Amino acid sequence: MAILVDRDTRVLVQGITGRAGTFYTDQATRYGSTYVAGVRPGRGGSRHLDLPVFDTVAEAVKETGANASLVIVPAPNAADAMIEAVEAKLGVVVCVTERVAQHEMARVKRALAGSKTVIIGPNSQGILTPEQCKIGVMPTRDAKPGRIGIASRSASLTSEVLANCSAAGLGQSTTVGIGGDAIHGIGFVGCLERFRDDPETDAVVLIGEIGGGEEEKAADYLASVEYGKPVVALVVGRHAPKGRRMGHAGTLSVFGLETAGEKATKLKRAGALLADDASEVVKTVLKALG
Amino acid sequence: MLLSEYKAKEILRQYGLPIPPGRLARTADEAEAACAGLPAKKFVVKAQIAAGGRGLAGGIRFAATPSSVREEAARLLGSKLVTDQTGPEGEAVNSVYIEPALDLKHQYFVAFALDPDSGEPMLIASSEGGVEFEQRVRMDASAVKTCLVGDDVAADSAPLAAFLDEIGIDAAKTADVLLAARRAFIEYDMTLLEVNPFAVTREGDWFALDAKMAIDANAMYRHPELESLAAEQKLAAAESEAQRSNINFVKLDGNIGVIVNGAGLGLATNDMIVDANGKPANFMDIRTTATSFDIARGVEILLKDPQVRAILLNVHGGGMTVCDTVAEGVAFAYARSDRKLPVAARLAGQNAEWGLRILKDRKVPAKVYGDMKSAVLGAVEMARGGAR
């Protein structure tokens, strides 16, 4: 069943005619996902990669029945693109664009108030339900269909963990990259809630890191419910110097708990099983599943 | 982009925030001369660096007379302040800011940041402020209280007044000032505006005594007026060179040079190194837009660092950065360098086999490992054995 996206997801691409838009649309359709349209203001009526191109998201939705979007546009245009997709009431909007300004993303969050749209990202590798739907820029060669849900703040570490899982026979129901930015769409809690409701997910892997408040919110959520499935957490950056930005904008948070050690402790207290390092994730999942 | 105090204050002054008169000085002579223009009996001499933690590191000195201002300035200028936010190299003090030392009744902490859930600006405040509080607030989120201050919040807003009242801040005297600060926070695309201390004098006047302002580097495209400030930002040499090459680089004080694609994998790698009793020389995150030439420059920074004794190459080729691009970069750098440090290499994911062949064909002195942990252990061992 998977979460958020599956073989019924119909994807449109905002920014389809760009170099990256072209490349990743091509990759995703080759992987077997259903891509139905592209949006590029001024290019409406043309075709690209054999898909119809529209001037606006609303037109594309009306003509093709698209229900999800991949936003792959330059950073200064990303917020407007996401807001357009929210206004067109798409179910899932994935933004892979890096370096979106915080106040721009704040504008998107305000536009989301009262909306049912789920935004994934920005600065996310996207979402993948193996052999059903890929919306994003992640590699697919190591992904296998299965019953492990993964939610992660880091693309590179997800590739590592996912490859280890697949090699050990642990396929994935869905993998969600929530993105490396301080202000973003869906968080760990949104992923955890959906994985909990998904009968085809047996266990969840959370890949967190220093900074931000995602791990704390996940811990509060886990402590507040009877989750019913094992949650394995890896929180990296235990030995990173404090107060310095380590790659992701989200890793330099402003206030409060932010060290990896404290985050891990909180998750553990809430019932999550900790993987000490990246190589321990598979072992921890296997142990939890008995 | 973190602004020095005096630049942050220049901006806040334009928004009408109450800022004490101050003078910037680049020499001890200038510092002493600056006192003549200030209405003060006592002075404070503040090192201008673009990093927090300055007070605890001795970067803020009080002086009773212009001649002791001169002495304190002489001591600070040209020195390096190492705070918990500067990294081990510290940051050089090239200028000091001289202000009157005010007779304070109480110090508060106020700051603005964006609420990650609602996207609204958020006022963060505490009834305590000052140098030590800066440390505490980073450890303990419960030390501060927060209040959303979106567009609909005006100076006469009852919830804002109630919030300030609870902290102990006089809303009648400060609500205007704080909303002006909110406007600066939004219009300058700040990710953080911290006024600590926000203080009241015995006479009942409120002042923003210090200001820490972080401007979003990702929003610089709409702030051409800040370009000159950005140019003056002094990143450590290695870090700015890497930045230009699409690599996020943070210098650390160890001896294992680390080449990794991606921030999360980079953090995970450094964790594993430290757990294995090794010491990483850096944190590296190769951005997805980096070419092999960019990566070569990142590798050269490590090869040039005399402290580095071994290289750990840990790549998980993804959808955007593939292994052969990184291997090419390493091979370029090694071909151009006389210092052939041993490499512990682990390549996995997209185009891993191709990347390994490049390392072998170009005679990079790499020992290849099948998984991340054994490569980390290999690098720790190599660093112990010393450079060849």
Image: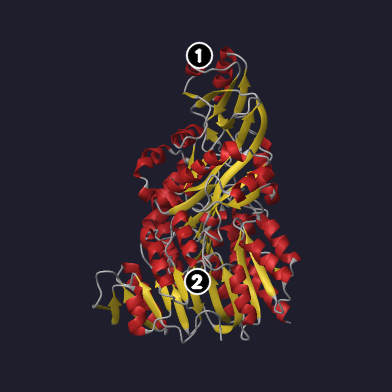
- Residue located at (65% from left, 63% from top): A217
What amino acid is found at the position of numbered circle 2 in the picture?
Ser
**Tag in front: 2 or 1:** 2
Residue A269 visible here? yes
Looking at the rendered structure, the secondary structure element under dot 1 is helix
- Please determine if labels 2 and 1 lie on a single subunit: no
Looking at the rendered structure, the secondary structure element under dot 2 is loop
Give residue A61's position: percent from left, percent from top: 37, 80
- Residue located at (46% from left, 43% from top): B184
* Quadrant of residue B171 within the rendered picture: top right
Q: Chain of mark 2?
A: A
What amino acid is found at the position of numbered circle 1 in the picture?
Ala
Question: Which residue was labeled with disc 2?
Answer: A115
Q: In this orientation, which residue lies closer to the viewer: A262 or B131? A: B131
Q: In this orientation, which residue lies closer to the viewer: B236 or B182? A: B182
Work out whether A257 lies above or below B169: below
Residue B342 visible here? no
Give residue B106's position: percent from left, percent from top: 68, 32
Q: Chain of mark 1?
A: B
Question: Which residue was labeled with disc 1?
Answer: B36
Work out whether B166 lies above or below A47: above
Report, in whole angstroms, how far the alpha carbon at label 2 lies from the one at label 1: 60 Å
Work out whether B298 lies above or below B69: below
Dot 1 alpha-carbon crowd within 10 angstroms: few under 14, some 14 to 19, many 20 or more? few
Q: In this orientation, which residue lies closer to the viewer: A190 or A181? A: A190
Q: How is the image coloured?
A: secondary structure
Labelled disc at residue B108: none
